[in-house]
Amino acid sequence: MKRIAIFGLVTVCAAEANAQGIVTFDAYEPFYGMDAAVFSPNPDSPTVEEQGNTLGQNTLAGLSTAGSVTYGGVPLGGSSYTGTTPVSFVDAGASVYTYGNLFTAELYALSTTTSQAIPPGTTLASLSPVTQYQSTFAISSAGPGAGYFNEAWPTTPDPGIPGTGYIGPGGKDAQGPAYLGNNAAAAVVAWYNGGGQFATLAAAQAAGVPWGQSSVFEITGLAEPSSVMTHDHNGSPTPAQFGAPFLDGMSNGTNTSLTSFSLTMDSEYGLAPSPEPGTLALALLGASAFLARLRKKQSQRD
């Protein structure tokens, strides 16, 4: 019994010593100025990624900044792929981008020590995957529907974004080493998962299947896990925060949030996958053989 009690005490202390900041991983919260649908590659330029909101999205979200991006692709998701998985990108057919369960979204983040400022030169390569904030895209028209990834529901307690939050014996009002900060530079990535075949962005990139990323933005006001009790600078217990912020914040005094982006694809895939990739090739071979035979007969007559 004593060993169990000691283990429980150590567990509680460990939780208090590392209460990392948590966030709500969701793409559609217009009340908070966020409407970030994700699109398939632009058929006219599939290797070029597009980023930013359209005018309609910003109007719906109540943002004052006019959008200037016109996406040539279609919103990801809206229906479910029910065929055999894992499935190759080509075999999924021409409707591949409408299958929400074949595409994954994930948060990449980096704690920032400077309040309300994304470190200069921050790119996706500067960030690390936060694996509990991962989900697939909508598989029906219910809710926001096509274009939006489903809200992630991490296990409890949510481990949060590494390097953020508060560490004991201080709390959110403490100064010095007890306070890590509640801001993070972040980006959202999305990729074709092949029905579970590509579990990570790195695997998708290595396979050459479509993937994309949002621009880097900052999340501010990260919350503490609801299972953690913190203390103020006087050592008095304070209740943990229950509401986690959305994917938005401030950077250098400017409102920032997750915005839309498109996937890109290797040029070898062409504009869209074909349901029967071998049919055209066979037809061309047959036509070539037929023309060669006609030319041979014509030469024999001459």
Image (cartoon, rainbow, N blue to C red):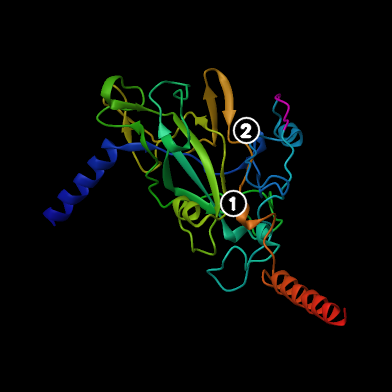
Q: Earlier in the sequence, mark 1 or mark 2?
A: 2
Is residue 266 in view? yes
Q: Which mark is residue 266?
A: 1
Residue with the most extreme right position: 302
Q: Nearer the viewer, mark 1 or mark 2?
A: 1
Q: Residue at x 45, y 51 (%)?
A: 202
Mark 1 residue crowding within 10 angstroms, few (<14) / some (14–19) / many (20+): some
The three-letter code of the residue at mark 1 reads Asp
Q: Quadrant of residue 36?
A: top right
Q: Label 1 to label 2, Cα distance in Å? A: 35 Å
Could you tell whether 75 is left or right of 129 in the image?
Answer: right
Q: Position of residue 3 (x, y in %)?
A: 12, 54
Percent x, y for residue 68?
Answer: 73, 30
Q: Quadrant of the N terminus?
A: bottom left
* Apparent side of residue 55 relative to residue 9 in the rendered image (left or right): right
Q: Give residue 89's position: percent from left, percent from top.
A: 59, 62
User: Is residue 66 part of the magenta span, yes or no?
Assistant: yes
Whether residue 232 appears in magenta in the rendering, the answer is no
Q: SS of the residue at dot 1?
A: loop
Q: Which residue is mark 2?
A: 32
* Res 136 quadrant in image: bottom right
Q: Which mark is residue 125?
A: none
* 179 or 263, nearer to the observer: 263
Q: Which residues are magenta?
A: 64-68
- Does residue 234 show up? no
As shown in the figure, which amino acid type bears the numbered disc 2?
Tyr
Q: Quadrant of the C terminus?
A: bottom right
